[in-house]
Amino acid sequence: MSFLGQLVDRLLEVARPAHHENRGLSERGILIFQHTSEVIKAEALLKSASLDVAVKGPPPEVRTGCDLAIEFPIVSELKAREILSGAKIQPILVLPLQDLLLEPVNLFQVKDFGAHLMVRAANMKITVSKSDLMIVNVSGGGCPDVPFLADQLVGRRLPDAPEPRTYGQTLCGYALQLAYEELKRRCLG
Amino acid sequence: MSWLIVGTVPYEGFPLVEGPCALTNGRIRFRDHTAPVARGTAALAAAACLTSEVLGIRSPNVLLAGDIGRGDGSTLVYRRMVDRVGESAERLIVFHYLLPEVQWHDRILMGLDDLTDKPVLVADAGYMYVAKMSGSAPSYDLFTPDAGEIAFLADENAPHPFYTRGFLLQEEEQVPELIRRAYEHDNAARYLLVKGRRDLIASEVGILAEVHEPCVDAMEPIGGTGDSLTGIVAALIAAGRSIPEAALLAAKINRLLGSLSDPTPAFSIADLLPALPRAIETALAT
């Protein structure tokens, strides 16, 4: 059986018992993609279409490595598929879901160095100079897009810098996006 | 001792390179290619080369390729490691920035486990993540996590630091409990060097040593300071120090590197590295 076939079977195995045991039906669904980069692009597209989506970790049984999935309102499946299809992004699987997903980090650590402010989300940190909002450092992380993202961000002002999601490919890139958004919220309102 | 650093550099099209590395005019040279010492594996390799030079040992070899996060360079590196693992002559291998891929990781580890004389294995960054994801953390000799990463190691359900559950607080004062929990669930290497306001060296039996001075707050936001620590500890192990001894000394050296450079949060690791030889000599003299 192909990897994709195994993935589908494993996910169905996980999903079915949950639905049999719990009569309450979830209104949420899950979109699984081949590549993390597709998840990041898909999230931006679906959000811009005002869909209530959230990036989550897939159930352990279907993880292959640095995976992401998108939780979305299952009632909007057609709309979601259409939006993604227009952007030539094809989920490999769409399923209803009940409490199978892990929550991404949602806590931020903020450290004030006087002239500089640092925000950490999970394993990623971004630091800005308070006086001119210049991004002076990006640190932490372990996926290969981190050094690349740091090159794109460091030395640029926060209002002008590209969002990490523009170039990010991995969960570390996604954590950096969250830290960046928090830093923007604190510095730019 | 022959030793190897395995990782990536963030440049598209940077080819697979294998062989010695050297620090020349502020850039790290890998055969015919060079890269700036900004952060990541280049910073690790630069710190390793400088430390090796001061200690009078052979510089490391590297196996790396360009990868901006798409995984293409990581795949080249993984594939080459699988091909060469049976004939590995290195006594120490340091795994670093690679896209976490459990299947590749497991193939490499199986090959290493089959060796009559398994090398010392150090993992940091993405490779530490995949080692934990695969359930193979105890097969490694040293991990070098920071506060966020030790919380990830402590969370038996988290496949990546991004998913670390909120009840595992990523605060400095929680680190000893997180270390205990990481060992309890077999998600730690034989030794841990946990970077933070206090650097802690730990094993299954608990905290072995702690270094908290000099304390330079500005080191935390500077990209590459964790990579330099991993490069220093690896060079000390290559020089024959035991892992706990190397970890303790490396923590002191990396802190001295900060205090000698008097950095602001806007410094880069390249600004700090010129002080590394003096930091090593100072730490060795005390």
Image: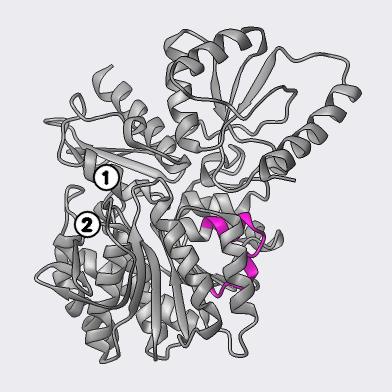
Looking at the image, which is closer to me, A145 or B286? A145
B236 falls in the magenta region: no
Residue B277: x and y, percent?
Answer: 19, 79
Q: Quadrant of the N terminus of chain B?
A: bottom left
B137 falls in the magenta region: yes
Alpha carbons under labels 2 and 1: distance apart = 9 Å
Q: Which residue is mark 1?
A: A150
Residue at x-position 57% and y-position 32%: A33
Q: Quadrant of the C terminus of chain B?
A: bottom left
Left or right side of A64 for B262:
left
* Mark 2 vs 1: CB contact within 8 A: yes
Instruction: Check the image and report above or below for B128 versus A126.
Output: below
Residue A61: x and y, percent?
Answer: 73, 43
Q: Residues within 10 Å of mark 2 (few under 14, many from 20)?
A: many
Mark identifier at residue B38: 2
Residue at x-position 64% and y-position 34%: A102
Amino acid type shown at disc 1: Ala
Q: Secondary structure at mark 2?
A: loop
Amino acid type shown at disc 2: Ala
State whether residue B227 appears in this view. yes
Left or right side of A186 for B209:
right
Provide the chain ID for the residue under circle 1: A
Query: Which segment did they paint magenta?
Result: B129-142
Residue at x-position 17% and y-position 47%: B266
Residue A100: x and y, percent?
Answer: 72, 30
Left or right side of B195 for A104:
right
Looking at the image, which is closer to me, B203 or A105? A105
Q: Residues within 10 Å of mark 1 (few under 14, many from 20)?
A: many
